[in-house]
């Protein structure tokens, strides 16, 4: 497709964040162009779980996910040596679905709303009044960096100053097996976690996350006997694929006429399963700010959106670093699953973070008493 001369919003990156931002901006009546150097459906190593709050935003964007494309899960189960605990979502369910299928749904919805696409196009620079795409200059009132973790737009707009940064490594593999649980399961190993999302009646998606870039799925499975037993006889579907999982925050996410969205604007550790939810929620806030012509609104909304997932990510990384603390927490939660239910409700935004204050005391007490058991 030829590069248009002018647009209201130019989005660099057509991943989940860029497409959600495009759909939300079109709903405000803005002309939108999206460029990505790949072509749909775009694949990426991912846990492939959409929490109920992600689905809520997708519905707002006009995307309904049918059962032919997905598999439901009703809650989360934590499993550690000698203890396990599970809780259901306070309402609704989450969905597991293959990443390319989700990407195609988003791309189709964006096209339906009138977004203009430049697939296979490389953005090589931005200027005060537009962008350089495939060597041609295109004028745009707003420029959105939705170009992922290693965002060039972030660097070009001088928005790279970090507030915080933690890096882990994720490896993903699918297995052909009937899902054995109606939950996403998180198995705690020594210095790593596995999480398993059912993505179809015959397939699960498994992700290993750790700080050790050398650790691979088969080796880590030796330290998780329950999970290994579940996978006995399951056939790996496709190769193991790796990705970096960042917990990072930038001092600013907007400057002048440039704003960042999705992983380009910061991200939470993959173990939270919140990356795409955040991207979708940010997209909606960004469109409101673009329509109002005020990116400060977006910066403030973005800061608020990041608080809860970062809190959860910090708690999970603490349990990863201190196995003794994790064992006590697991024993305490399995002795009092209602606390786990409250934490899960907070995680999916159904309870205010203030619920943590009322949860911390009983959890602390349980950790002291259950720890002595
Ligand atoms: C191991 C792992 C497991 C995860 N599991 C989950 C999960 O279960 N649930 C969940 O919600 N989240 C999960 N996440 C997080 C989620 O994958 C990310 O938050 C999500 O991909 C962010 O989308 P994005 O659009 O911001 O970035 P990306 O998906 O990285 O898309 C960026 C796009 O920009 C394009 N691009 C970049 N530069 C240019 C350029 N100069 N010109 C043109 N195009 C460009 C790229 O081709 C790419 O398509 C996981 C992450 C990891 C690492």
Image (tube, grey):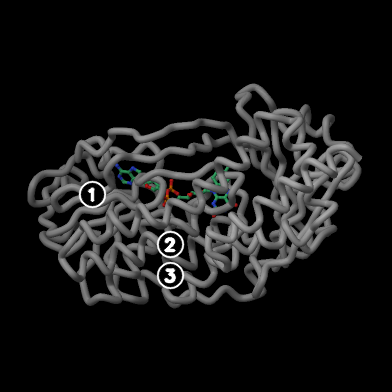
Q: Which mark is residue 254?
A: 1
- Secondary structure, mark 1, is strand
Q: State the image coordinates of residue 47 (x, y, percent, origin top left).
A: 62, 49
The residue carrying mark 3 is: 108
**Direction from residue 195 to residue 317 in the image, left or right:** left
- Secondary structure, mark 3, is helix
Q: State the image coordinates of residue 33 (x, y, percent, origin top left).
A: 24, 61
Q: Which mark is residue 58?
A: none
**Direction from residue 216 to residue 243 in the image, left or right:** left
**Direction from residue 140 to residue 97 in the image, left or right:** right
- Quadrant containing the C terminus in the rendered view: top right
Quarter residue 348 falls in = bottom right
Could you tell me which residue is drawn at 72 percent across and 58 percent down? Answer: 339
The residue carrying mark 2 is: 280
Q: State the image coordinates of residue 197 (x, y, percent, origin top left).
A: 70, 55
Disc 3 residue: CB within 8 Å of ligand 1: no
Tell me which label, 1 or 2, sits earlier in the chain.
1
- Secondary structure, mark 2, is helix
Tell me which label, 3 or 2, sits earlier in the chain.
3
Q: Residue furthest left?
A: 129
């Amino acid at each position: 497709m030829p590069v248009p001369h002018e647009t209201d919003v130019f989005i660099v990156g057509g991943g989940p964040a860029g497409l959600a931002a495009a759909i939300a901006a079109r709903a405000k009546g803005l002309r939108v162009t999206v460029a990505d150097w790949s072509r749909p459906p775009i694949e990426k190593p991912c846990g492939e779980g959409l929490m109920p709050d992600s689905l809520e935003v997708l519905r707002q964007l006009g995307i309904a996910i049918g059962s032919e494309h997905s598999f439901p899960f009703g809650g989360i189960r934590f499993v550690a040596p000698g203890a396990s605990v599970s809780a259901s979502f306070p309402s609704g369910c989450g969905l597991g679905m293959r990443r390319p299928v989700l990407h195609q749904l988003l791309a189709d919805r964006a096209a339906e709303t009138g977004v203009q696409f430049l697939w296979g196009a490389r953005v090589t620079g931005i200027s005060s009044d537009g962008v350089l795409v495939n060597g041609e200059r295109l004028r745009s009132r707003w420029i959105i960096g939705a170009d992922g973790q290693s965002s060039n737009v972030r660097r070009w707009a001088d928005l790279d100053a970090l507030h915080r940064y933690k890096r882990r490594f994720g490896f993903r593999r699918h297995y052909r097996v009937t899902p054995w649980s109606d939950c996403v399961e998180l198995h705690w190993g020594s210095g790593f976690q596995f999480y398993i999302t059912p993505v179809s009646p015959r397939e699960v998606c498994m992700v290993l996350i750790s700080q050790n870039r050398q650790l691979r799925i088969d080796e880590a499975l030796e330290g998780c006997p329950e999970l290994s037993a579940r996978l006995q006889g399951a056939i790996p579907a496709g190769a193991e694929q790796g990705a970096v999982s960042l917990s990072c925050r930038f001092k600013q996410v907007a400057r002048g006429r440039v704003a960042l969205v999705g992983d380009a604007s910061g991200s939470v550790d993959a173990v939270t399963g919140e990356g795409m939810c955040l991207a979708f929620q940010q997209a909606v806030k960004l469109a409101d700010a673009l329509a109002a012509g005020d990116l400060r609104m977006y910066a403030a909304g973005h800061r608020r959106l990041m608080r809860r997932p970062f809190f959860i990510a910090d708690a999970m990384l603490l349990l990863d670093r201190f196995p003794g603390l994790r064992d006590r927490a697991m024993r305490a939660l399995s002795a009092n699953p209602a606390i786990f239910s409250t934490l899960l409700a907070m995680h999916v935004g159904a309870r205010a973070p203030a619920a943590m204050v009322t949860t911390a005391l009983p959890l602390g007490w349980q950790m002291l008493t259950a720890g002595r058991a």
